[in-house]
Structures are given as structure tokens and as C-alpha cells.
Amino acid sequence: MLVSRKRLKITETFFQEEMTLELELKAGLKTTLLEALNANKVSINQSCGGNGTCGTCRVEIVSGINAVEQSSSYEQEQSIELQLRACQRLACQTEFSSSTEDLHIKIVNEAI
Ligand code: FES
């Protein structure tokens, strides 16, 4: 199976930590940002279990917007409902694209 590699840089604002993950994503399989973070044991709030309803998994895209797919209409609706800023995405709804572009995100972990 074809694999695409991506570098994911993560800035966590609460503990002020930075880390970089080397991801191997299987071609043809949709992988969300939340799934990648969970698989690599990166702590992120996810109160609704990835259903896109709580807003606790919000992240800011610092750079590499082409490394992820555009928001689905469901995510766009939820982003309005949850009052996300323009640079923020729901990790549970954000799928990696086939681009080899690296991604830098900031885990927000703010009180909702
Ligand atoms: S885990 Fe609830 S919106 Fe993503």
C-alpha cells in the first residue's frame, strides 16, 4: 500500500511544548488530525468523541494549509455554531490531504 509522509509540528499552548511527528499516511485512507494525534499519544481535548459537536478539539493552522483537505459543509456549519476563528479547525473533522506539504498546528486548549 502506498504511503505518504508528512511532518506534523505541534505547538501546545497550555504546557508551552513543541514537538514534531513524522507521519506515515496510507494512500486512499482518510485520516483525521485527531486520529493522528491520538495514535501518537498527543493530548488534546475531545469531549464529544470526535463527532464535531463540542469544539474542544479545535486547533489553529499555523502553516501548511494545503496539508489538509478543505472544511466539509458539516465542519463549516459546526465552526459557525462553535464560533471558531478563521484560522481554527476541528481536529476531528480535519482530514489530511494527499499533499506532501508539512503541517504546523497549535493546540488551543482554551476554556470553551
Ligand atoms: S472532539 Fe468534539 S468537536 Fe472534535
Image (spheres, rainbow, N blue to C red):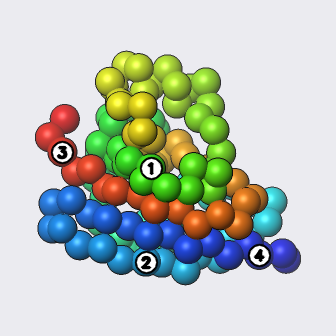
Question: Tag 4, which secondary structure?
Answer: strand
Q: Amino acid at mark 1?
A: Ile
Q: Earlier in the sequence, mark 1 or mark 2?
A: 2
On the image, which quarter does residue 73 sit in? top right
Report the residue at 52% width, 30% height from top.
Answer: 75
Label 3, label 1: how far apart the Cα atoms are: 15 Å
On the image, which quarter does residue 96 sit in? bottom right
Q: Is residue 34 visible?
A: no
Q: Quadrant of the N terminus?
A: bottom right
Circle 1 packing at 10 Å, graded few (<14), some (14-19), many (20+), is some
Residue 15 lies, in percent from the top left, at 15, 67
Q: Earlier in the sequence, mark 2 or mark 3?
A: 2
Q: Nearer the observer, disc 1 or disc 4? A: 1
Label 1, label 2: how far apart the Cα atoms are: 14 Å
Question: Tag 2, which secondary structure?
Answer: strand
Q: Which residue position holds label 1?
A: 61
Relative side of 26 to 42, left or right: right
Label 2, label 3: how far apart the Cα atoms are: 21 Å
Label 4, label 3: how far apart the Cα atoms are: 34 Å
Residue 83 bears which disc, if any? none
Residue 30 lies, in percent from the top left, at 69, 55
Q: Quadrant of the C terminus?
A: top left
Q: Amino acid at mark 4?
A: Val
Q: Which residue position holds label 2?
A: 20
Q: Is residue 6 visible?
A: yes
Question: Tag 1, which secondary structure?
Answer: strand
Q: Is mark 3 within 8 Å of ligand 1?
A: no
Residue 110 bears which disc, if any? 3
Report the residue at 34% width, 56% height from top.
Answer: 106
Q: Which residue position holds label 4?
A: 3
